[in-house]
Amino acid sequence: MSMAKVIVHIDLNAFFARCEEIRNPSLEGKPVAIGRDGRGGVVSTCSYKAREYGVHSAMPMFQAKQACPNLIILPSDFRFYWAMSATFVAFVKRYTKLVEIASVDECYADFTDVVKDVKDVPAFFKKLQKDLYNETKLKCSIGVGTTKFLAKMGSDYQKPMGLTIIRKRDIAKILYPLSLDKMYGIGKKTAPRLKHIGINTIGDLADRCQKDDQQVKDILGKFFYVIKDWLNGEGSDEIISEPEDPKSIGNSSTLMHDTNALEEIQQLFQDLAKEVSNRAIKEGKIGNTIQITVKESDFKVHNKSITFDTPTNDWKTIYTRAISLYNDNFVGLTVRLLGITLQNLINPKDMAIQMSLFDYEKHEEESATKLLINELNRKLSKPSLMRASEVDKK
C-alpha cells in the first residue's frame, strides 16, 4: 500500500482587496469592495471589514452600498493582481515544484517529500504562512489533507489566516457538522434539492451516501460515487503542475543576403509577426511589450522595445508596432537578421474570468466541476468526459 500524500491547498484571503491594502495601507481595517460602481456594477471581492456589514462577492454594488454606507469602492487593477499572484506562486514553488494553480488566488501543492522529516507539521505550515505574509504582506488560509478535496475543505474551514489539517480520521469530527452549503463540489443548484430530501449537513450527506441512497443518486447523478469517495477520504491526490510559463515568445530569421531594402524587411517582419502571433494564440497568451532585434551585416546587434496598454496577440498589431520601431530607429542599416519578441505575457482567459464574471461563486462551481470531471475520468481510466463549454474548443 502506498503512503498517504500530503496535499496542501493555499487560498489567498480577500485577495483583490488585500492587494489594494498592500498598495495603500491606509485602507487596512476599512470596508473596501473591488468592482465597478454605478449601474450593473457587482462586488468582485471585498475586505473582511466589509463582510461584517453583510457585503459579499457577486452582490450588486448598489445593495452593497445600502448595507454599508461608508463602503470604499475601488476599480479592479488586474495587472497588479496578476503580478501579486505570480509572486505568491513563485513563493510556493520554493518549497515544491509540484504546484497546481487553481485560480488567481489559490493553488494546490504536493508537500509529501517536503514534510516527511518534519517533526511539527502544524508549526511548519504556520511558519510558511507567516513567511508569506512577511515577504509579500499577502494573507492566506492553508488546508492540509491526504486528497485535494480534504485540502480544499481545510483551507475554507478557517479564514483569514487559518490552518486546518484534515486526515481521514478527522473527517467525521471536522466536516460532518458543517452545513451542506460548505461542501465543495455541491453547487448552488444541487444544494436546495438535497436539503429538500432532508440533507442539511455534510454528515447527513455522508450517511445517505454510505447507504447508497437512491434519492441522492438521482440528484447527484454520475457524481454520486465521486462525492461518496471524497467523504470517505478517497479521491484524487494528483497535482497537475503546469509546464513553466513562458514570459515571452519570439522568433528571428536571417535574411538570404544582407539588405537595406525596405520591402524585403517589411515582408520578413510580417512573416515573423504571424509566427509569433500563432504561437501566442496556441499558448493562450497575450503580451503588452514588443521588442525587435536587428543584426547588422557586421554582426552588431540592436534591440528596441515598446510597451503599450492593451495586451495583444494579433499579428497585424504586432507587425505595425515592430515596423514603426524599425522605421524610427534603424532605417538605412544593412541588415542580416531580424527578430520580434512579444513580452510580458499573461493569460487572457484568466483575465477575462476575473474581469467579466466578477462572480466567484460561478468560478468556484466551475473549478469544483472540473475537479469532479477529473475524478470521474480517473475512474473510467480514459478522459471521456469534459465540460460542455470545452467541447467546441476541441
Image: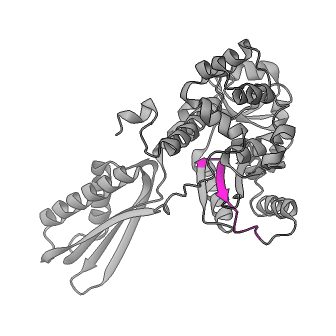
Write the start and end of the magenta stretch as one range.
Answer: 102-116
Along the viewing direction, whichever of 20 and 246 lies nearer the viewer = 246
Q: Is residue 111 magenta?
A: yes
Residue pictured at 71% horizontal, 26% vertical = 211
Left or right of residue 42, residue 370 in this image: left
Along the viewing direction, whichever of 357 and 50 lies nearer the viewer = 357
In the rendered image, which quarter is residue 382 located in? top left
Left or right of residue 343, residue 34 in this image: right
**Does the rendering let one see residue 335?**
yes
Residue pictured at 18% horizontal, 61% vertical = 266
Along the viewing direction, whichever of 109 and 330 lies nearer the viewer = 109
Left or right of residue 253, residue 352 in this image: right
In the rendered image, which quarter is residue 177 located in? top right
Q: Is residue 194 above or below residue 165?
A: above
Left or right of residue 197, residue 39 in this image: left
Residue pictured at 34% horizontal, 40% vertical = 394
Which residue extends farthest top?
196
**Does the rendering let one see residue 30?**
no
Residue 326: x and y, percent?
Answer: 28, 65
Residue 38: x and y, percent?
Answer: 63, 22
In the rendered image, which quarter is residue 299 located in? bottom left
Along the viewing direction, whichever of 192 and 103 lies nearer the viewer = 192
Residue 273: x and y, percent?
Answer: 27, 57
Residue 186: x and y, percent?
Answer: 66, 28
Task: Point out the image quarter for the N terminus.
Answer: bottom right
Q: Is residue 227 magenta?
A: no
